[in-house]
Image (cartoon, rainbow, N blue to C red):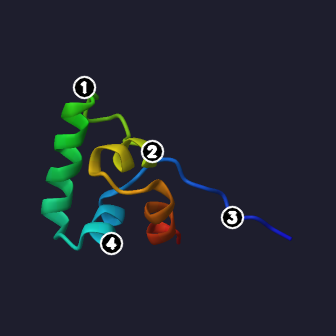
Amino acid sequence: MKTEPKRICIYVRDVQVVTGKSYRASHRLLDSYRARLKKSREEFITVKEFSALAGIAIEDLVAMIRD
């Protein structure tokens, strides 16, 4: 049985699905979280980091963004 690879980084589209916000609002949210984490624009935000900052249980988040 083949298992699906699990992603550890979160993308703008994932934030859209979880929050119901537009693409631009989701992008701004990720940018603000990146600034709070003191990451450069090229660095990714992990699902775990997003979960902690957004206050969403990681299990709920993973269930919503699963492809």
Q: What residue is pinned by disc 2? A: 48
- Sooner in the amino-acid sequence: mark 1 or mark 3: 3
Q: Residues within 10 Å of mark 2 (few under 14, many from 20)?
A: some
- Determine whether the residue tagged by mark 4 lies in a helix, strand or loop: helix
List the residue tagged with mark 4.
Answer: 17
Q: Which label belongs to residue 30?
A: none
Disc 4 to disc 1: CB gap under 8 Å? no
**Image point 75% across, 64% down: which residue?**
3
Q: Residue at x 52, y 69 (%)?
A: 66
SS category of the residue bearing label 1: loop
Name which of mark 2 and mark 4 comes first in the sequence.
Answer: 4
- Camera-nearest label, 2 or 1: 2
Q: CA distance from mark 1 to mark 3?
A: 31 Å
User: Element type at marker 2?
Assistant: helix
**Tag 3, which secondary structure?**
loop
- Taking the image as shown, residue 17 lies to the left or right of residue 58, namely left
Q: How many marks?
A: 4
Q: Residue at x 20, y 55 (%)?
A: 27
Query: Which tag, 2 or 3, sits closer to the chain's start?
Result: 3
Q: Which residue is denoted by mark 1 in the rendering? A: 38
47 vs 29, left or right, is right
Q: Which residue is mark 3?
A: 4
Looking at the picture, which amino acid does disc 2 mark? Lys
